[in-house]
Amino acid sequence: MLKLTDLTKHFHTKHGIVRAVDGVSLTVPNGKILGLVGESGCGKSTLSRCVMQLLPVSSGSIKLNDEELTILSAKEVRRHRLDFQMVFQDPYASLNPRMTIFATLAEAVRQRHGKISKTEATQRVATLLETVGIAAKYMQKYPHEFSGGQRQRIAIARAIAPEPKLIIADEPVSALDVSIQSQILNLLRQLQRDLDLGMIFISHDLGVVHYLADNIAVMYHGKLVETGSADDVFYRPTNDYTKQLLNAVPKIARHSDV
Amino acid sequence: MPLLSVNNLKTYFDTRAGIVRAVDGVSLNVEKEQSVGIVGESGSGKSVTCYSLLGLIPMPPGRIAGGTAMYEGTDLLSCGEKTLRTIRGKRISMIFQDPMSSLNPYMKISKQLTEPLEIHDNIHGKKARHLAIEMLEKVGIKDAEKRIDSYPHEFSGGMRQRVMIAMALITKPDLLIADEPTTALDVTVQKQVLDLIKDMQRDLGTAVIFITHDLGVVSETCDEVNVMYAGRFVESTTTKDLFSNPLHAYTRALEASIPAMHSKGEDLHTIPGLPPDLTKPLHGCSFKPRNLLGDASLCLTDQQPELVETTPGHWVQDCPGCRAVRKSE
């Protein structure tokens, strides 16, 4: 379980203090998906970078399974980082084009399991690929030989390879076509069920977030303005900003049920 | 008479791997003040269709292999670059997905906005600048008089897209082609930009062709929609009909893939496989291998299905397999 308490991250700039994350408290239980929404610049990415220990926090606490992460030394942070993995928006940019899929995934597996034999690595990589729905026989191929949807599957396999406790998915389906998007969303749901992962799913597409997430947190100017179950936030928003955000989602006019 | 009438447009690319039939027989009418949508996956030929109309296809490797596009008595496909230059940016304008890469980073906004006026309307100097400021105000940029001397990087993404729109509409075109105008933007900004296009359309009477992959955007903005797959339209109808009575298996599959149309916890429909390789000539129905919502065994294999009008204004490819409705499991 991930627990953030009163997390703040301030940047000191020429023009004064930017309060990118300003007193955020939230919890992500294992096996649950938290949808984080908000417009660009609201602090979503800074928040996820703080959780990933890529940025030191200004104050507040981040606890993963009751272990405080903000006080760890740099060395310990590196060890702990395996527990969090990220999936990024652009699968074209997030895989190393010069490494085969096997090399990419085996590297990630070895992060957790140290030196393992090639046979064992092959076996683990095969299992990983199977989990995300790609045939193991393709493991010697390079990223450019796969389609966008397949690449995002590989990026997801890469993220779950070190057996993390938490995955932060930053707009993982925004760059994909609707048909591929639905494959990836189905995959994420399946992983959440099977691996009991906690997940922070960042997206600006409220339809997608409502469909996937158990809980939704709405962020505005570095603060959480509304949190609640996905249905509550989506159907019964109380905050004005949330209402405004929901109002902006293009609606598909249904004239009859199909 | 429609404003723009495209008939059987074919755009091919000669590549080392063979001829890519990117657009293969597309027909489309746009009436004055109408919004027409083209939806489809990446690579379906949406953008190439519109680029072809404006002569923006690099030739070679591209070439217009057939068809006509009549705009006020001129065939845009065969009129030549000189004539096209008097139309492009003046009578027909275009806005692109990424406002950062379509504005010149070295040029002040003022210069980029007045350029179309200088070229097409012979308006220069103070008068042009005045019109540019007016236009910026119209697209909702505050403090336009000051902001006009800024460079593109000084604007946020949504603001840049507004500048693009101002630039496209400053010559009061008859037709605006919007290629994924909001894909790179936030929902709130997306709404502002879509509303802005709608407002400008009402004020100036401009017709709009929307290229998008977002069915939600289509539903909110377009009067008519064309669903494109593998270089051809598979279904064309009014927006209302497309969502209430989708006929083609591909249209139904697209609609079934949208999370917003599902309740939580329900599995989303996925379209298996990939779009066909367009370097190989297609014999028969292009959607056959991915057809799950119809009956793939009935799909045409000997000839490509033609569009037929099932009810007035509702056109669909006449492939028995894609029109069949699979009984839900």
Image: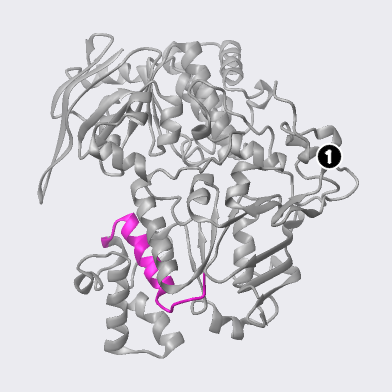
Residue furthest out toward the right: B302
Q: Is residue A216 or residue A137 the one in the foreground?
A: A216
- Give the residue drawn at x 58%, y 24%: A102
What residue range appears in magenta?
A: B154-175
Q: Position of residue B15 (x, y in %)?
A: 73, 58
Is residue B165 highlighted in magenta? yes
Is residue A82 highlighted in magenta? no
Q: Quadrant of residue B88?
A: bottom right
Q: Is residue A46 or residue B188 the one in the foreground?
A: B188
Q: Type of residue at label 1?
A: Cys
Q: Chain of mark 1?
A: B
The quarter of the picture where the N terminus of chain B appears is bottom right
Horizontal side of A126 relative to A191 (left or right) equals right
Q: Is residue B199 or residue B79 the one in the foreground?
A: B199
Q: Position of residue A172 (x, y in %)?
A: 45, 34
* Residue at which label 1 appears: B299
